[in-house]
Image (tube, helix red, strand yellow):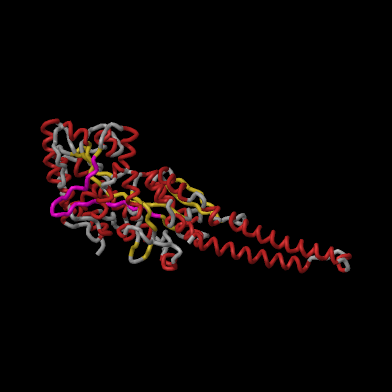
Amino acid sequence: MKRKWCAKFVSVLICGALLLGLAGCGAKEQPAESATNDESSAQEDTKIQEDAQAQEEAAVVEAKNDTGDVVTLTIGVWADDEAGRLEKTFEGIEEDLGIRVEFLKYPSDSDFWDNIPAQIAAGTAPDIISCTNEHYLQYIDQGLFEPLDEYVSSGAISLDGIWEKAMDAWKINDVVWGVPYALNPGVFIVNNNMWQEFGLGDAYPTTWDEVLEICKKVKEEHDMAALCLNIQEYHLTNIALSFGGGWDFGKNIGAKENGEALQFLIDAYKAGYIVTPTELGLSWDGAVMIQQSALFSTGGAWYQSSFASEAPDIELKYLPIPKGGNGNGGGTCHSAALVALKNSQHPEEVAKAISYAVGGDKLYEAVVDVTEVIPAKEEYFSLYQEKASALSDLVGYLDSSTPFSYPTQSKKFADSLINLMQETLFDESSSMTGQEIVDQLAAEYGVQ
């Protein structure tokens, strides 16, 4: 698409410059003596031809450099590493398309999402944002995203080669709301140093029942909780999916598989097999694992960079999420996408910028080099496995992963899920069951 737009742009400018040049030549006043001086007339004709050629060449240079009016687009991001990979992606876009890209960085993801609706209303929102498929449904429902079907159907934006499940996550009711460019499946993470030190053998757990047996052994022999549970929607959703459950955009919240998954966690916590970051005064599960206060956790590729900087001597094993109940295992899949926000003053340039990013190599190379996550185009899977060798197994876990599929009121749903689980785990007098939790959530956030 980039070459086509540039070629058309150059052609228009050349034709316009030639017409202007010829009009200028026809109106040019001749010196009085030129009418009777053949030599002077010939020199003038030569000069006219040279001027026309110079103007044509200048038009080509101007088209290539695009020194006319430059459209500026703003891209909203909240994470520094995400900004880093997109900055690399859009290098050269001004020279190529005459579009200047500036980044608006938000302090946190909550600032990002809390401010965007008001910014759209005020006309100060970014033209494009990069976001994941976690809490996006409520913003689609509020009409804050611009559908991209028109540009996809016209060929202005190509979805060729994008991993099908990632694309499915961004196609709601057959409408395309974003173009995914990065994938990050949920995994079960093992501190392999501790595993070896505790003499737990060569066979890693593949089911939650096997995890529970190891937790019992570690509790008895080392008096510690082996499994870290960060009571956040990401981790709870991974475990619900591994039991064969999931939220299905609000249609499946009260399923017995979801109740079984939460009950498994409640029972394991009360038996002393689970530790939470909150109890240790830590902010997230990775910090628990770094200080070796747990053997297992659920997480993603972001663990690798954290351990490389803070605990480089610890070896991690990245395994599929264990199977629970009658489920087939498998967890979540983050899918980062470029999204056009509503009310941009430059919708055509937004489409061109998204096409520029997802149609070239730089975006997918930066996804690997900057953040060590899987590019969304399947042709780059092998590049990921080559460059991020410690994480290469994650490509094989994609097929068993599932989008988050939170209900429309995703943030409120997540807050309610977290609060109910915290109350059940931390209040010794609580007798609430996993099924009661999901039934209560279904009554409030479920859809038929």
Above or below residue 437? Residue 227 is above
Give the side of residue 386 with respect to residue 347, left or right. left
227 and 275: which one is in front?
A: 227
Above or below residue 436? Residue 171 is below
Q: Residue 335 colored magenta?
A: yes
Q: Measuring 86% from the left and 65% from the top, which residue is drawn there?
A: 34
262 and 212: which one is in front?
A: 212
Magenta residues? 317-337
Give the side of residue 47 with respect to residue 197, left or right. right
Q: Position of residue 76 (x, y in %)?
A: 45, 50
Above or below residue 338? Residue 235 is above
> Which residue in the rendered view is the most extreme toward the front?
39
Q: Measuring 22% from the left and 52% from the top, which residue is drawn there?
A: 330
Q: Measuring 33% from the left and 37% from the top, which residue is drawn there?
A: 306
Give the side of residue 162 with respect to residue 36, left or right. left
Please say whether residue 164 is visible from this viewpoint. yes
326 and 390: which one is in front?
A: 390
Q: Position of residue 322 (x, y in %)?
A: 18, 47
The image quadrant where one finds the C terminus is bottom left
Q: Position of residue 37 (x, y in %)?
A: 87, 66
Q: Residue 202 colored magenta?
A: no
